[in-house]
Image (cartoon, helix red, strand yellow):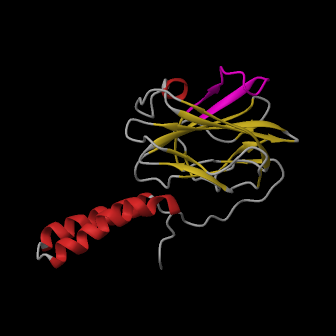
Amino acid sequence: MMIPIAREGWPFILIPLSLAVILWIAGWQVSSAIALVLAVSVALFFRDPPRDIPKGEGLILSPADGTIVHVGPYLGRELQEPATQISIFLSVFNVHINRAPFPAVVEEVTYRPGTFRIAWQPEASADNEQNLIMLKAPEGQLLVKQIAGLIARRIVCRVVPGQKLEAGERIGLIRFGSRVDLIVPARAELFVKRGDRVKGGISVMGALR
């Protein structure tokens, strides 16, 4: 079966793939094989597998695949109420599609320039280049931060203010390793802890009712 690929990945895949063909025609089989392996590796990074989205009232889903590196109080004031931050580190081996954690309307999308610290460092949440997606639902506000890392230098956001999202719907991606922070009201019930591995649109992070 063909692996679904995010549309943003095709320019990065076609370059080494085209190079592999050219090198093969030129008779440089070893170099062609190396270029082909690179094309396949990039294709795997941009894979976009379908997900069976859990159904349930008030469920908060993971916005990304990866490992939870932090769970604790959020110091920002964007939610205008006490909030909890859940940080997910994405290695180059994870699926990098970001998904909506909750059925909501996009209230605001804000880009913030910054540094490019290693994504698993705590300082990355505040200092790194990032894109903030504020979501508004009857149950409350949630914030998704798409955060660039040391290698990841390109954040892709597919949503705009006023857009209505279903839980698990694709909202963007970050190229080549990154971090995604999920900020939820402190009153939300959490089901995860630091060190847990999660999958975007599948893993239930908690509940907000």
In-front residue for pair 56/159: 159
**Residue 81 sits inside the magenta stretch:** yes
- Taking the image as shown, residue 88 lies to the left or right of residue 158, namely left
Q: How many marks do you count on the picture? A: 0
Q: Left of 126 or right of it: where is 133?
A: right
Residue depicted at 62% across the width and 64% down the height: 51
Which of the 4 image quadrants contains residue 32?
bottom left
Quadrant location of residue 72? top right
Image x and y of residue 189, in percent: 76, 37
Relative height, residue 118 to residue 81 (above, below): below
> Outermost residue, right direction?
138
Q: Position of residue 3 (x, y in %)?
A: 48, 71
- Write the start and end of the magenta stretch as one range: 70-86
Q: Position of residue 13 (x, y in %)?
A: 37, 63
Tell me which residue sits at (41%, 48%) in the image. Answer: 176
Residue 40: x %, y % from top left? 34, 66
The answer to whether residue 169 is above or below residue 178 is below
Which of the pair 44/18 is nearer the observer? 18
Q: Residue at x 13, y 75 (%)?
A: 26
